[in-house]
Amino acid sequence: MTDLARRRRKDILERMWSQFRSSPQGMLGLAILALFVAIALAAPLLADAGSLDPVTARGRGYPQWAPPGEFPLLGTDNLRRPVWAQFVWGSRISLAVGLAATVLTVVIGATIGIIAGFVGGRVEAVLMKLTEWFLVIPFLPLAIVLASILGRSVWNIIFVIGVTSWPWTARLVRSQVLTVKQRLFVDRARSLGASGPRLVSTHILPNISGLIVANATLSVPISILTETTLSFLGLGSAGAASWGKTLEDAFVNGAITRGAWWYFVPAGIGIMTVVLAFTLIGRTLEEIADPRLGGR
Amino acid sequence: MHPGVTPLLRVDDVHVHFGDAKAVDGVSLEVWPGEVMALVGESGSGKTTLIRAIQGLQRLTSGTIAFDGADPLAAGRTGRQAHHDGVQMVFQDPTGALNPRQTIYDVVAEGPRIRKADGHEREMVASALSRAGLRPPERFFPLYPHEISGGQRQRVVIAGAMVMGPRLLLADEPVASLDASIRGEILALMRRLVDEEELAVVVVTHDLGLAWNIADRVAVMYLGRIVETGTTEEILRAPRHPYTRALLSVVPEAGNVERQILRGEIPDLRRIPQGCRFHPRCPLFQSGTLPPHISARCTGEDPGGVPVGLVAGAACWATGSG
Amino acid sequence: MMTEPVLSLRDLTITYHTSGGAVPAVRGVDLDIQRGGSLGLAGESGCGKSTLANSILRLLPPGTEVQGEIMLDGRDVLDLNPGGLRAVRWTSGAIVFQGALHALNPVQTVGEQIVEPMLVHGTTADEKEAKRQAIELLGRVGISPDRFHSFPHQLSGGQRQRVLIAMALACDPLLLIADEPTTALDLMVQAQVLTLLQDLKEERGLALLFITHDLSVLTSACNDLAVMYAGRIVEEGSSARVFADPAHPYTRGLASAFPVIGDMSSRMAPSGLGGDPPTPGDLPSGCPFHPRCPLATAACLPEEPGLRPVTDDRRAACILV
């Protein structure tokens, strides 16, 4: 029997995939994302990580502030580091931080949303007060305070983003849980004697998972932008060179006044296109999960 | 009627209040094995709240509900589980009652899985589906609810209840959302289950034809109370309570009874009229033909509800047996 | 009758075009409703009755193919330009849908919603007059004038259905199309609404097209009855006769679903039809009812029977009549 169920589940996934495929915006997003994932995965083949170290770069005799014409691909920065290498390796950090922070956001948000929506009563009141509290705290000051207390590391950045951005997910999930909880099939399972965890796992989660995935996809770009913001403000990780860190370095070292556009433009375009890709994919998933949103 | 047999279900002076709204306001009833009892009333009469309370989906404000002699709410977790096995529910809207993400197999297997039942799940599911008239059952296993017809969905809901081997089936308007043509089949299925498996059924409905089709006894509910009870023949052929008479007169197929269309709708549950709760809409009271000593009681004294047991009765100062 | 009918359908054929191919929902229907007449259209879900109702005011989704002729109040609805169509809606024909909650705008008071069509169609001179008429209409459908400023959610289901009827009557139409107007209502409220429709019909000379799956409701509300199956009319005649003595086996099945209380033959013996209605996109060959018909023989298979006379005023589409 489980075979049968598995086959049917496969059918559903195939149907969703064919729906996704028929959406030009979704496929465009997927193509862009695939390109950047490929770059991130193939970073060791595309650029030498060693050249990111100013000492190595100087030792190799790379020029300083070289525009793309003078030094292959994208030129160099004030410390003679190739911008191309920064771009390639930075994509790793940006994508990883974006994804990891999103996982944290969704885990915290969905857990709180499900508990609040399903349990209800006083628990719900307390959890939703907490959520609202996090929502009204101005995000950036909180993130700055947290980041400066915790210190500068990739993990802390992920933590800061996760802790500050879950309330949106929690609210969305709670409202969905409240809707599904009203459905008659939940009553039916209850009258069969189903326990709370069973109700959540077999009846509520499967009916809201599509929206959670869509929401998660849409919060990846927010996480990436947040990482960029924090890095730009000098609160990013000290060692790892994310795109946001590249932007900060370029700004601090006067690339803009010098007119050294090649320093910051690649990272900027990278951030914009990845954010766009995730947004396109997320919107498409959202339409598949909840057909009322789409125009069809 | 059932001498020497103890009732399967005993509901004793049950109240369910939502704040000021008294949805169920003192109902007592008994149901015996092998019978169908129709709980008739309009929306707002409290009939759905009452069966949800019997199922354990709704907390009681006061009163007791005893299934097979035991109080499900007092008996703790194992008691509740036994109650769930023994009492199952069929819903008005079979489309809503089925999880769109579950296959028919998973829907029917859910009960046994929750109970961690011994025996072969596959056989149990197949047998329940075919008893509910879905044959061959294997054809339905992999289907999703949206892939079958409305009538078949209601059969799946019934199979999902019957797989637990219940002794009492609670049905909330089981055919109201189905096409007229499907109605007879589902009712015939329910009656057959009662006759063949010694099941008892409490069916909530506003459809008096349904009661005539399958019910042994009828209880009429108005504003949280049972205002008249008796055998189906007694209630539908010789109703005593003016409310039952009015309901019966507006059934389109009632024939040549003079139609008594009550004015207005069921009053707000938070403002239940004084005296007899039906008197503001009662054609008998409003006609002004009642003797003064009776009409004074209608406005001043609550006739109470009638307990649904072996004896027929009507909660009416003018026509009730007293 | 010699007068020109209010509504006349000739060979009406409606096809939906879906991703799964062409779905014939209505397949060649002829119907007439006289001024002040009432016709009940009965059938199961998917038989095409709601599609037919919506086609009269051209309320079908775009891309739906409508062939044949729809004459409403002497005008060919299928030929009307958008302006003419707007004029026909409300003034010649108006529709009352099932599910009164969804058909009303939740953020507008019920009064405003009745006044609006009057002003849009210029049937009243000014706002003041429209408001006066709206209050009168509300009173006529049994809703107190102080409800004028209520919002739909503040009313009960029965009251909302009455508001919808008042709305439909705002521009004094000749034909009222009621699509399952009482399905979600309680027995007593249903009786109230049916009586109201009956009274309005007599007072205003309103013609009524009443659509439902509940045959028993139609017998008390309509003079004539047409039974639809798989997009076609399979039986038509006076409603009392059709219900009491159905000629088509399908009508017989539908009628038997509603027992006569007190009739011992139906006591403890619920009956109805077996099986499910056919999918419009995949109709059985020959008589589309034959897979469910208790009387079907090999003779039913070769071709689909047309309507043939049973008595002077009744016709049925069955080879056995």
Image: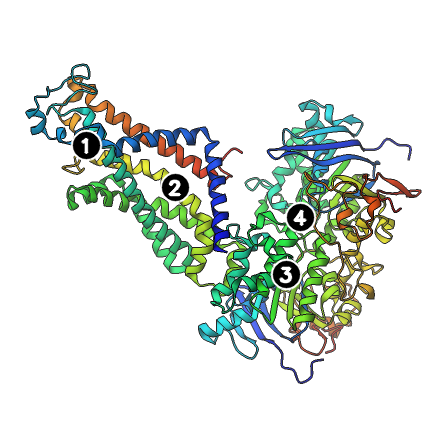
Subunit that carries the residue with mark 3: B
Spatial separation of the CA atoms under disc 4 and disc 1: 70 Å
Tell me the amino acid under the disc marked 1.
Lys
**The image quarter in which residue B258 lies:** bottom right
Label 1 – label 3 distance at C-alpha: 66 Å
Do marks 4 and 3 share a chain?
no
Q: Chain of mark 1?
A: A
Query: Which one is nearer the viewer's eye here, C244 or B317?
Result: C244
The numbered mark 2 sits on a residue in which chain?
A
Q: Which residue is mark 2?
A: A215
Q: Secondary structure at mark 1?
A: helix
According to the image, label 4 marks what residue?
Answer: C144
x%, y% of residue C256? 79, 56
Mark 2 touching mark 1, by CB under 8 A? no
- For the residues beneath circles 2 and 1, the answer to whether they share a chain is yes
- Number of the front mark, 3 or 2: 3
Residue type of the residue flagged with mark 3 = Ser
Give the image location of residue B292, x and y in percent: 75, 72
Comparing A170 with C296, the one in front is C296
Q: Is residue B96 above or below residue C5?
A: below
Q: Earlier in the sequence, mark 2 or mark 1?
A: 2
Amino acid marked by disc 2: Asn
Q: CA distance from mark 4 to mark 3?
A: 53 Å
Disc 2 from disc 1: Cα separation: 27 Å
Q: How far across and down, in percent of the image, does residue B317 sit?
A: 72, 73
